[in-house]
Amino acid sequence: MANEDLIYRITRAVYDRLGGTIDDTMVEQLVTDIYNQVRTTATPRSAPANDGSAAQLSVMDGSSDRMVISVFGLDHPGIVAGVSQILADASCSIIDINQTVVQGKFAMVIIADTSRAGESTAELKDRLRLAGEKLGVRIYAQREDLFNAMHRI
């Protein structure tokens, strides 16, 4: 089973059991913990899978090295610079960026490569959230694989 499909199925089970009112951050943490437990007991990466193909890559490969960052708030100078500086300080590369202003409301989405980050995803998310408070915007960040799986629901 592909990683994204497994993450989707775990996420779906968590939402089914705990209901739609649960905090998305809590779901992300639960899914990550469950997936990591499943991964550590799964077939080793170098061993062939049951279907004869190479074993699936772990959740730490591919899109788990990318982060989806959403920024929302009232428009003012310095928002893009502030968020970009945090990513640069963490040795993250911006893969894609899109921002718009609609009637004074600012919205931006960044896809960042975090594979060279000198800190954990949780630490980077906290730094982005705190920077958002200082910048007067809301910043939401999530690993891309979890983002994709959670938004299939």
Image: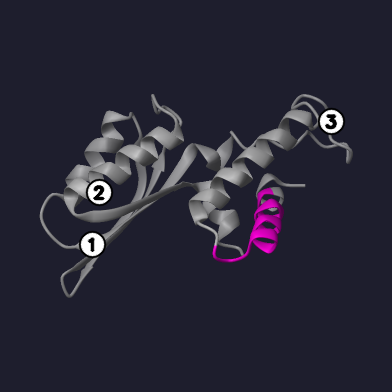
Residue bearing mark 3: 48
Q: As drawn, is 140 to the left or to the right of 17?
A: left
Q: Which mark is residue 54?
A: none
Q: Residues within 10 Å of mark 1 (few under 14, many from 20)?
A: some
Q: Residues within 10 Å of mark 3 (few under 14, many from 20)?
A: few
In the rendering, at what x and y percent does residue 81 appear? 18, 45
Residue 18 within the magenta-colored segment of the rendering: yes
Q: As drawn, is 106 to the left or to the right of 97?
A: left
Q: Main secondary structure of the magenta part?
A: helix
The residue depicted at 38 percent of the width and 41 percent of the height is 125
Instruction: Give 112 or 132, whichever is nearer the viewer.
Output: 132
The residue depicted at 74 percent of the width and 37 percent of the height is 38
Quadrant of res 136: bottom left
Q: State which region is magenta.
A: 7-21
Secondary structure under the numbered disc 2 in the rendered image: helix
Foreground disc of the pair 3, 2: 2
Tell whether label 1 touches label 3 (CB within 8 Å).
no
Name the colour scheme: one colour
Instruction: Give 95 or 36, whichever is nearer the viewer.
Output: 36
Secondary structure under the numbered disc 3 in the rendered image: loop
Residue bearing mark 1: 73
Q: Is residue 56 above or below residue 102?
A: above
For marks 3 and 2, the one nearer the N-term is 3
Q: Which mark is residue 132?
A: 2
